């Protein structure tokens, strides 16, 4: 069974793909196959746009504050389906839309992706993880190598031109105060908000 949509708190999450260019040392999918009461988020196959849209009929959309593209993979790996789904959500339900991303969508799709989000996505949340490029490579282990950290920062900067709310995140307890201060400065320079998100075990 493909779990495409699942609830977390007051939001509806969209699980489009299990593909990801990173192998983060802290990734939750290394230790679990679900979130909350989602059922397994490992997909039997990448869902088509028709399959994704059909799933929304099974949910009472009035219950949700936000629709979030975030599952057991990088949402920008399924860019075309993501954009069509976002357009559908905006037209039919007028819900705020967020993407949780590693920020490497330009590398994944071999083109600029931030302009494509204009008018469709309200918030982009990008995993900053660390203020240090070398530490980033050790933590995130991106397949694109050494240019990945700067590409993630560049993507965040581009998003500020097209998306109303750009947030960069680190995880509570993983950095010291000095490192968090450096992250806050990076976000300020990029034009993004800085959020320290809670650790989820």
Image (spheres, helix red, strand yellow):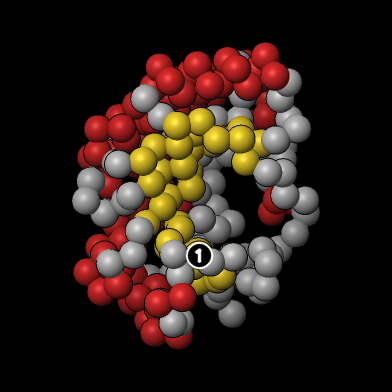
User: From where the camera sits, is residue 187 visible?
Assistant: yes
Residue 25 point in image, percent of width and height: 72, 37
Q: Position of residue 153 (x, y in %)?
A: 43, 24
Is 28 left, or right, of 109 in this rendering?
right
Q: Looking at the image, which residue is at 31% across and 61% down? A: 86
Query: Vertical placement of 121 versus 50: above or below?
Result: above
Q: Which residue is mark 1?
A: 11
Front residue of this view, candidates 35 and 21: 35
Work out whether residue 46 can be spotted: no
Residue sitting nearer the eye, 141 or 71: 71
Locate the N terminus by quadrant.
Answer: bottom right
Q: Quadrant of residue 179?
A: top right
> Which residue does the image show at 77% across and 51% down from the upper left?
201
Query: Residue 51, position in %: x, y?
Result: 39, 77
Residue extending furthest toward the bottom: 58
Position in image of residue 74 (x %, y %): 50, 49
Q: Nearer the viewer, residue 65 or 17?
A: 65
């Amino acid at each position: 069974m493909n779990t495409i949509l699942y609830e977390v708190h007051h939001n509806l999450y969209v699980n489009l793909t299990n593909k990801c260019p990173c192998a983060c040392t802290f990734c939750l999918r290394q230790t679990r196959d679900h979130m909350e009461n989602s059922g397994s988020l490992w997909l039997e196959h990448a869902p088509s746009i028709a399959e994704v849209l059909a799933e929304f009929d099974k949910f009472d959309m009035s219950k949700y504050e936000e629709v979030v593209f975030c599952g057991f993979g990088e949402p920008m790996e399924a860019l075309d389906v993501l954009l069509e789904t976002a357009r559908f959500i905006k037209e039919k339900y007028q819900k705020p839309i967020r993407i949780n991303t590693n920020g490497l969508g330009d590398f994944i799709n071999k083109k600029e992706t931030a302009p494509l989000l204009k008018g469709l996505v309200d918030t982009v949340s990008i995993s900053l993880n660390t203020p240090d490029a070398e530490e980033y490579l050790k933590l995130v282990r991106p397949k694109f190598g050494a240019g990945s950290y700067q590409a993630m920062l560049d993507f965040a900067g581009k998003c500020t031109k097209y998306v109303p709310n750009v947030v960069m995140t680190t995880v509570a307890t993983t950095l010291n105060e000095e490192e968090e201060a450096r992250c806050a400065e990076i976000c300020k320079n990029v034009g993004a908000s800085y959020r320290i998100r809670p650790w989820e075990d």
